[in-house]
Amino acid sequence: MTQRYSKYKDSGIEWIGEIPEHWEVRKLKFICEINRDTLPENTNPGIKIEYVDIGSVSFINGIEKTEHFTFKSAPSRARRLAKKNDTIVSTVRTYLKAIDFITGEKSNYVYSTGFAILSPRKEIKPRYLASSVRCNFFTGQVAYSSKGMSYPAINPTDLGCLWLLQPPLTEQESIAQFLDEKCARIDEAVRIKEKQIDLLKEYRQIAIHQAVTKGLNDQVKMKDSGIEWIGEIPEHWEVIPLNYIGFTQNGISKGGEYFGKGTPFISYSDVYKNETLPQNINGLVEATSNEMLQYSVEKGDVFFTRTSETVDEIGLSSVALKNFENATFAGFLIRFRFTKNIYLPEFSKYYFRSKTHRTFFVGKMNLVIRASLSQELLKKMPVLIPPLFEQNQIVAHLEALTTKTDEAIHLKEQQIEQLKQYKTSLIDEVVTGKIRVS
């Protein structure tokens, strides 16, 4: 049975309700300093900084990555400084749970102005402060007080007027220790399940690669494919450059005023996020009849992402499993259309989306400003051609396998979400006095 405090009182704040009788309700500005240290504008332009952006901090892992810049090349928002025992807390509604406690090397980082740096006064224990600002009671106030449409955020003055609960220092220490121990176990359980998801995805990718390059019969006679990163393939399969079995086309390019109305439009994200094009396309563009003919989207077409900031996002494919009437596609995409009936659309889904071709693309692209895949490079890509009946068998095998792995991944994701909800609920109940831990 949950242990509660012996006496409670009305907090005077509607969304908190009752709190332990001996606790106080304090405004944040009275128990910590906010944004005490900032990197000055006259900092040496050549000095190297390790930067933490607002999107690089998670509720479970805290700071997940940093970026290296010189001060001159760093984003203008790279200004906040934090010391050991400070807490960084998001002031942006979109990233409410971007919160972390500063220890060790984290005190050497430079933080985005999307964070507020909270430096505890003597009235509050550093780790208790870090736990308190993670609870829904506090992040809810941040969300409610945020202003702005495109980038809703709370300013430091308004942040300082938000409420926190302040138990006696000895209780703060007990609460912080209790939550540190409990949350560490929860976080580790989440990390284990995330690792299991990564392994399932890796297994799925390996199984697809094996099926689309070696087939399903491990007794079949093999031959050298002549392609270093593929190795041997079934003897009866063919290897043909892409341009011998179809043709390519870059997508439509128009000004922004043409988008948002008109006929269906296949976007970059439609391809990037999906192995097959979505059944219902949300994008619209005003296109002429000639443009709809030139940039048409037919069953069996394979679309490749053409340009991006990184190589990892180039050459990802998505297949049309039906005709899209009057549709066109984005200029950041390349369409490949078969001229021979040698590939099942369902087989294309697995073959072209697999990592089979990454070695071919990487190192041969134009990386001057943005990674870019040209039609000429795509046309040279060697393609394996199994017989159609064998493609059918491979598709059936992979559909069954991916269904199982996707179900397992979905179950792990549900378990992770439950753990996150439990962590939030536990923090809420402890730092608002609903549960007594000492």
Image (cartoon, helix red, strand yellow):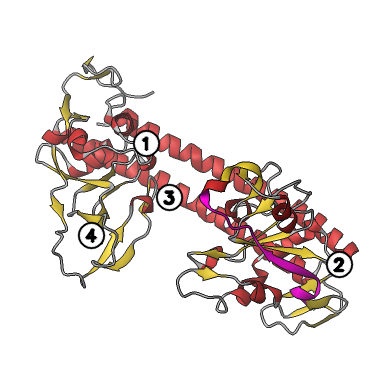
Q: Residue furthest left?
A: 122
Identify whether 278 is placed above or below 247: above
Front residue of this view, candidates 344 and 63: 344
Residue underneath mark 4: 104
**Image quadrant containing the N terminus:** top left
Q: Are marks 1 and 3 in contact (CB under 8 Å)?
A: no
Q: CA distance from mark 2 to mark 4?
A: 61 Å
Q: 33 or 106, which is in the foreground?
A: 33
Circle 3/circle 4 CB separation < 8 Å: no
Amino acid at dot 4: Gly
Label 3 – label 4 distance at C-alpha: 20 Å
Residue 285, horizontal then vertical, whole percent: 62, 46
Q: State yes or no: discs 3 and 2 in contact (Cβ < 8 Å).
A: no
Circles 1 and 2: CB atoms closer than 8 Å:
no
User: At numbered mark 1, what does the secondary structure look like: helix, strand or loop?
Assistant: loop
Residue at the image point whose x is 59% and y is 70% from the top: 373
Where are the magenta residues, as a range? 241-256
Q: Amino acid at mark 1?
A: Met
Residue type, label 3: Glu
